[in-house]
Amino acid sequence: MTFEEYTELKKKIDYHMDRYYNEDAPEISDYEYDQLMQELKKAEKENPEWVTPDSPSQKIGGTAKREAGVKVTHNVPMLSIEDVFDPEEVRAWVNKVQEMHPGAQFSVEQKIDGLSMSLRYRRKADGNGMELTLAETRGDGLIGEDVTTNALVIPDVKRSLDIDADYLELRGEVYMTHEDFDKFNEIQIRDGKKEAANPRNLAAGTLRQLDSAVTKERGLRMFIFNIQDGPAELMAGHADGMKALSDAGVPTVFHKKCATADEVIEVIDQIGEMRSELPFDIDGAVVKIDQVAYRNDFPSGSKYTSGHIAYKYPPEERVITMDEILIDVGRTGKLTFTGLFHDSETGKPARLCGTNVSRATLHNQDYINEMKIGIGGKYKLFKSGEIIPKLNGCVEEPAEVFTAPDRCPVCGEVLEREEDTADIRCINPACPAQLSRTIAYFTSLNCMNIMGLGDQLVEALITEGYLNNYADIYKLKEHRDELISKGTIGKEKNTDKLLNNIENSKSNEPARLLTALGIRNVGQRTAKTIMQHFKSIDELMSASAEQLQEIPDVGATTANDIVHFFANEGNKKIIEEFREAGLTMENPETEEGGSALAGLTIVVTGTLPTLGRKEATELIEKNGGKCTGSVSKKTSYLVAGEAAGSKLTKAQSLGIPVITEEELLNMIKQ
Ligand SMILES: [Zn+2]
């Protein structure tokens, strides 16, 4: 590339940069633009002597990437404004100011719900007007973040100002319109991505983007609400300063100058009425002393800006019409109710605090009755800040108040209404809606103790259709090759490990299986007690409630829960599947265990070929032995597996017999 060609290229890029950043009307695609920049950078790398500060590669806005986290100390701290919630408090404050400064006037302004940003301008080198040198976020009020690159793509932020001053610091609010916010969320929904919560959050995230092209695309706006620092003529009266900015083309926030408390309150009311019609969110009205010099006489606490207060409007409220009531069965079997509705006035989702609301939780039947909720009924809806939308009273009653069904909408089982809470539950452990929970319980340590079947894997196996009930766990091996090729569980090694753990669980004693079934009121201890009174699961299944109640610890409720569970056809089928899969349904013959190890103290160390540490301990204790954790002179045997460490060394040094798992099992058999 010749120097002439390089100069031409610079001009070309400058032109497109201007179309892109300032005119908002690019003529070439971002890709083509990037290509030109690449060409330029390549030429500059080869000919470093050509590079001057006016090269597009050296300019702000020319580089699309912003460096994150560059901290800037504010020249004037960006403090917050003290909130008041009662118009009378506003009046009292205005009166207090006017007692000291009878001539004090006020500016009442919209408080835009966005994020504050401050802009620093300096006189241009050629002396003609000013140029933006720094844009910074509020941060913690004392130190903010440099967001200059992104500020430059906001059309409301002027790159240069035709104002005759050396230095000017403006403060304003960056916000997003409802239209741009909705547009963003529509795209997110289309792409299956998470929606933004409200315009303020989205504006904040957008301003802090690393790629200013993203910031530009999403669309941010800014209103200036204060001159923080500047020439004396702009700093005397607030309204005059705003006028000068406005004349220079700077968008300023809606503001009105007021002389009395009555006027101030009138403008607050006016702004309140505008609120629902504005294309953006406001979260209050700011009242500030117009004469900037008076402000410091009214500091309202060290963390608040002096000479300002913010009036907060009561939460917005809309009237909605109920269209539909959805019933969901949660993971715990609890029924939840969600009301779907539309704004009675607009026919669209209700617009509250910058978000579209078309659904709200209806809690439980008591709440539904109390609120008289039903299809066609009209209700007040309010939302404050980030709080979940809430119904706030019935305006027009429906023809019929909604009543929860008697049967589970998912499995068809009769629902239970809990006595002390208003909750309604499906207590069928085989209910598909509760599958992931019941499976997690089934495999847990005190139940079937199947290691490696975690929550996420269970969810994946359910989603992929491998698990429709907990008996399906034992059918996973039929899909071994498919699971490995899909990588659902992992590679071959992990898949086989899990399948092996599942196989091993088949030999668990029936009390574990009974616990794992998740019958209400039948926990680990009760299951153990029950299985001491029955030879097998089959015997238990045919027991009557009366028979069950003869067992200590088993009351009428528990007995009924058990009978109810085994009477269910679906549950019977699952038990049959367990039997077919080869699970242990009968108690071992030697119910009380043997006494083969009576009087022996045994220590287990290392990894045994088949028994887990807990299983080995149980086995030893069941056969009358005592299991301890450390080797001493009193130790009778050390059962050592693979990778046995210091315990083995110690046993050897003490001359204690070391045996294998096989030898231990043989001792029990005798
Ligand atoms: Zn159910």
Image (tube, rainbow, N blue to C red):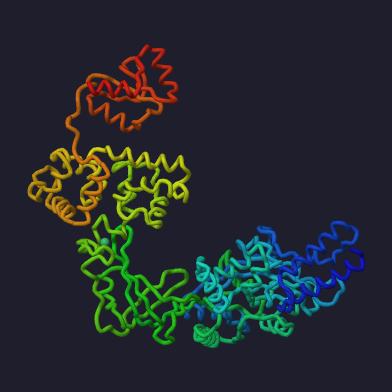
In this view of the protein, which residue sits in the foreground, 81 or 438? Answer: 438
Q: In which quarter of the image is the C terminus?
A: top left
Determine the residue positioned at 24% across, 45% down: 580
Q: Which of 494 and 51 is in front in this view?
A: 494
Residue 261 visible in the picture: no
- Nearer the observer, 478 or 294: 478
Quadrant for ligand 1? Answer: bottom left
Residue 519 is left or right of residue 285, and the answer is: left
Compared with 577, 419 (above or below) is below
User: Would residue 386 appear left or right of 153 to someone viewing this image?
Assistant: left
Q: What residue lies at 81% left-to-right and 78% top-to-bottom?
A: 164
Res 350 seen here: yes
Location of residue 254 in the rendering, given as x and y in whole percent from the top left corner: 61, 83
Say which of 517 and 102 sits in front.
Answer: 517
514, above or below 647, in the image:
below
Total numbered badges shown on the rendered structure: 0
* Up-down relation of residue 573 to residue 597 (above or below): below
| Corner quadrant of residue 648 | top left
Picture quarter with the N terminus: bottom right
Quarter holding residue 183? bottom right
Picture coordinates of residue 380, whole percent (x, y): 36, 80
Residue 635 horizontal side relative to residue 248, left or right: left
Q: Position of residue 352 (x, y in %)?
A: 46, 77
Residue 466 pos. (x, y %) = 37, 53
